[in-house]
Amino acid sequence: MDSMQIGISLYFLRDPRNLMVRYIGISNDPKYRLTQHWSERLRHYTTGLAKADWFRELDSQGLRPVLDVMITGLTKHQAKRVEHRLVSNWMAKHPGQLLQSPTGIPDNLSEFTKLWDKSSERERLLIERIIAQKSLVSVAS
């Protein structure tokens, strides 16, 4: 996929029992990506992985994650920066709620500053808008 391709979406996977955001991701086809994530619960080698274990728990109750597409129309490069910023922000404000690895996410302020400085004004506004939305407020707090 071309890094300049437009049409990438940022999405949340929410717990249907309390609507808590459990995963933040990007994809050019979020519905299909959800089916890929969901199939992880069937793979034996995913035992012990938080997201797959959460999926197995939901499946045992006859539930599925809620897909919430937050933004569409981003380039892959923009989407990655927005995703990194949101995941980092969420992990800082609500430790333990996201069921994803922070792999690839800068772990210090100087790296975020570099990412932020490279962001366009449009990207910064998108990030700020999503961070400010009530949908990012933890319902478990």
Image (cartoon, rainbow, N blue to C red):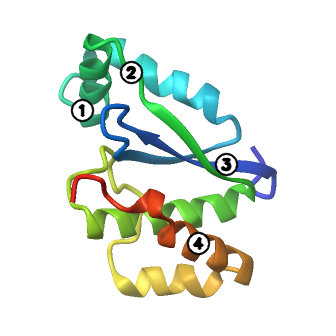
Q: CA distance from mark 3 to mark 4?
A: 15 Å
Confirm or deny contact between disc 2 and disc 1 (CB under 8 A). Answer: yes
Q: Is residue 13 above or below residue 84?
A: above
Residue ID for mark 1: 49
The quadrant in which the C terminus is found is: bottom left
- The residue type indicated by label 3 comes to Ser
Q: CA distance from mark 1 to mark 3?
A: 25 Å
Residue depicted at x 27% and y 14%: 61
- The residue type indicated by label 2 comes to Glu
- The residue type indicated by label 4 comes to Arg
Q: CA distance from mark 1 to mark 4?
A: 31 Å
**Among the two numbered marks 2 and 1 on one chain, the one whose residue lies closer to the N terminus:** 2
Residue ID for mark 4: 129
Confirm or deny contact between disc 1 and disc 3 (CB under 8 A). Answer: no
Confirm or deny contact between disc 3 and disc 2 (CB under 8 A). Answer: no
| Residue 134 location (% of width, % of height) | 46, 63
Q: Secondary structure at mark 1?
A: loop
Q: CA distance from mark 3 to mark 2?
A: 21 Å
| Left or right position of 137 against 36 | left
Q: Nearer the viewer, residue 140 or 76?
A: 140
**Among the two numbered marks 1 and 4 on one chain, the one whose residue lies closer to the N terminus:** 1
Q: Is residue 39 above or below residue 112?
A: above
Residue ID for mark 3: 9
- The residue type indicated by label 1 comes to Leu
Which numbered mark, 3 or 2, is in the foreground of this view?
Answer: 3
Q: Is residue 133 above or below residue 19?
A: below
**Among the two numbered marks 4 and 2 on one chain, the one whose residue lies closer to the N terminus:** 2
Residue ID for mark 2: 40
Q: Secondary structure at mark 3?
A: strand
Q: CA distance from mark 2 to mark 1?
A: 10 Å
